[in-house]
Amino acid sequence: MHFAELAAVRYSVRNFLEKPVEKEKIALILEAARRAPTAANRQPQRILVLETSDDLARMDRCTTCRFGAPLAFLVCYDHREAWVRDFDKEHSGWVDASIAATHMMLQAADLGIGSTWVMWFDPAITRIEFKLPSYLVPVAFLPAGYPAPGSIPSDQHGDRLPLDKLTAHGTF
């Protein structure tokens, strides 16, 4: 499948089979995160793989948005490793972790694995449940697995702004 087709057909899956995801496919998804571009190649993304019933129960205490997935990733970044822009001290951690998560979701889709970006979670509870050190910042959960029969994109999946609303040449 060409990239444009993959990007068009990938959607947020909210109904999963109980079938576990093979280790080889998990490794490929994680490799996609490893290869993701990051500011100054600092690679601050850190990813927890959640596949045991205990891991998933802990996730369920952080968010109601697991959707029955048999696998999830907790995408974080190490704020000590993130690049910092000199002008205003903005750091790249959120962006770097988000790029890595996007690569993961697209790689998963290419493998027939569905996923969903979940930012609706309690960071304080997440820190406690997963014993995150203070330097790790949780960005998103990615529930993942094989889509259940009848799983379809949300009604809003195809709603996209026209390109001229998103782009400009020179200035806005």
Image: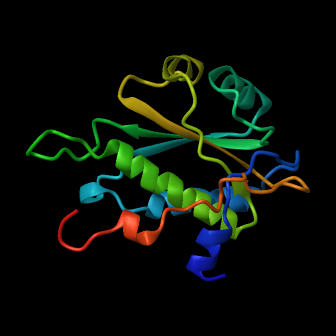
In the rendered image, the quadrant that contains the N terminus is: bottom right
Q: Nearer the viewer, residue 18 or 116?
A: 116
Compared to residue 84, the image places residue 23 above or below, namely below
Quarter of the view holding residue 31: bottom right
Q: Who's the residue at 68% across and 58% down the image?
A: 11
Q: Who's the residue at 38% across and 22% down the image?
A: 134
Quarter of the view holding residue 26: bottom right
List the single residue furthest toward the bottom. Answer: 2
Q: Who's the residue at 45% across and 50% down the image?
A: 98
In the rendered view, does 72 fall on the left or right side of 145? left
Q: How many marks?
A: 0
In the rendered image, the quadrant that contains the C terminus is: bottom left
Res. 61 in view: yes
In the rendered view, does 16 fall on the left or right side of 34? right
Q: Position of residue 64 (x, y in %)?
A: 70, 27
Q: Who's the residue at 43% across and 62% down the image?
A: 36
List the single residue furthest toward the right. Answer: 149
Q: Nearer the viewer, residue 40 or 62?
A: 62
Res. 28 in view: no
Q: Position of residue 49 (x, y in %)?
A: 63, 42
Q: Nearer the viewer, residue 162 or 55?
A: 162
Q: Position of residue 47 (x, y in %)?
A: 52, 43
List the single residue furthest toward the left. Answer: 87
Q: How is the image coloured?
A: rainbow
In the rendered view, does 126 fall on the left or right side of 90? right
Compared to residue 33, the image places residue 75 above or below, namely above
